[in-house]
Amino acid sequence: MPVKHLPPDAQPREKLLARGAAALSDAELLALLLRTGIKGKGVLQLADELLHLKNRDGDAGFDGLAGLLHATPDDLKRVKGLGPAKCAELVAVLELARRAMVQQLQERAVFATPDAVKTYLQLQLSARTHEVFAVLFLDAQHRLLVLEEMFQGTLTQTSVYPKEIVIRALHHQAAAVVLAHNHPSGSVQPSPADEALTRTLKAALALVDVRVLDHVIVAPGMALSMAEKGLL
């Protein structure tokens, strides 16, 4: 049913203004961004289709709101009726979310907002189809200086070189780091290799007085802090 045919209090914009954004479903919020549908497909239907976007293999690789946020412009172009303007708007919303989190992490110690750290890393890494190892370099107050994606690998593993991380830590004059990598398999449980790597990096960085505060493992919809689990 077209939005204009809905009762006024059920139309997304009026519902938001009357009851607040939290009262809207994911599809309704997305419909506000899209604004219009296409011939034969209302904006709410288009929004629902986007929320159930499949990847190129037909799997639920981008299923749901979190998956949509990780979709690339090429992924979005596969949805009929989603032209360049709407693709650009959706990508812009994701980038605004990332930048807001970066600002938050730059202005306060990362462990003042541990959930924000995990969410930020999920946005950055969890949708990758191959393993990526990244490092958050922090200042003496544990505020974010920069996130660098240091190494990339295959679906199941990547090679990490401690020397390169030490060099970058010295370059940024970092006082501490948070390590991070993704598991494309979907599990966030650390492997014995993950735990061994963390110990190796802690020892290497300790030689230049840089602390490893955490090692975060992310996957779509999930994140695990090794520090919170007592594994650091």
Image (cartoon, helix red, strand yellow):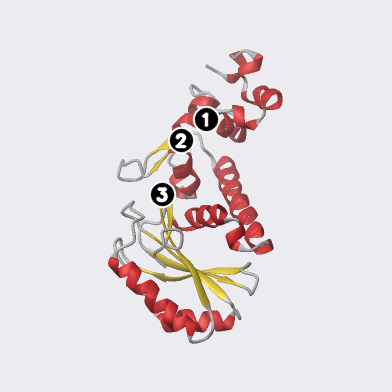
Q: Are marks 3 and 2 in contact (CB under 8 Å)?
A: no
Q: Where, by quadrant of the figure, is residue 60 drawn?
A: top left
Q: Which secondary structure lies at badge 1? A: helix
* Numbered label tally: 3
- Residue 122 higher or lower than 57, as above or below: below
Vertical placement of residue 193 versus 112, above or below:
below
Of callouts 3 and 2, the N-terminal one: 2
Q: Earlier in the sequence, mark 1 or mark 3?
A: 1
CB under 8 Å between callouts 2 and 1?
yes
Mark number for residue 76?
none
N-term mark: 2 or 1: 1
Residue marked by disc 2: 51
Hey, what amino acid is under mark 3? Pro
Compared across the picture, whether 43 is left or right of 192 comes to: right
Q: CA distance from mark 1 to mark 3?
A: 20 Å
Quadrant housing the C terminus = bottom left
In the rendered image, residue 21, in percent from the top left (x then y), is placed at 64, 31
